[in-house]
Image (cartoon, helix red, strand yellow):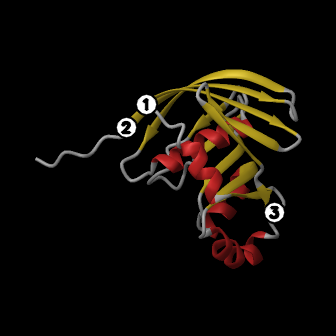
Amino acid sequence: MNMAIKPTIYKASLEISDIDRNYYGTHQLTVACHPSETVERMMLRILAFAINAGDRLEFGADIGDTDEPALWEKDLTGAIKLWIEIGNPDERTILRACGRSGKVIVYSCGRATAPWWNAAKPNLERARNLSVYEISRETADEITRFAERTMKLHCVIQDNEISFGNDNGETSFAISELK
């Protein structure tokens, strides 16, 4: 009998103070890290949650399901208000998301960002409801060091500067806007 490998479950208490958006809250998150997903990517999903936090923001199925993003926010009617992708998604996936959602955000990370964006930019420039950001390799490494099966994290956002960490330390950084 062939047994599928189950995702690793992480629990995070995430305290957010987003001074730029006047959003303050603590979220109790349960995050499934799929066997094909790195802990770094999972932490990038948590960071994206912190940056875009709201009462209706939730994690999507994402891995292996192109019909769901890493994160999304739906209104009370089920309409998708916000669609968030992590990594370097296929242009068709992004354009399809732009047609289904009020706003689409892509957070790309690592050395592959520049080649991916240079290739995708001509086709994605026309998408008016799309924003693309680059998270540096150093930032991804820094936030990954806070990963634990049970985490107590905090995130402060002010003047587009982000401080992210736990009781044992933090890192501060900004992310670059590509579009």
Looking at the picture, how far across and down is residue 89, in whole percent? Answer: 59, 63
As measured in the structure, the alpha-carbon distance from the residue carrying label 2 to the one carrying label 1 is: 8 Å
Q: Amino acid at mark 3?
A: Lys
| Residue 133 position (above or below residue 112) | above
Pick out the residue farthest to the front: 168
Residue named by callout 2: 8
Screen quadrant of the C terminus: bottom right
Q: Which mark is residue 179?
A: 3
Residue 72 in view in this figure: no
Q: Could you tell me how far apart the alpha carbons at marks 3 and 1 are, in whole angstroms?
A: 34 Å
- Please tell me which of labels 3 and 2 falls first in the chain: 2
Please, what secondary structure does the residue beneath circle 3 have? loop
User: Disc 2 on helix, strand or loop?
Assistant: strand
> Disc 2 vs disc 1: Cβ atoms closer than 8 Å?
yes
Residue at 43% x, 31% y is 149
**Mark 1 lies on residue:** 149
Decide if residue 121 is on the left or right side of residue 35: right
Residue 124 in the image, given as x and y percentages of width and height: 75, 69
From the image, state whether disc 3 or disc 1 is nearer to you: 1
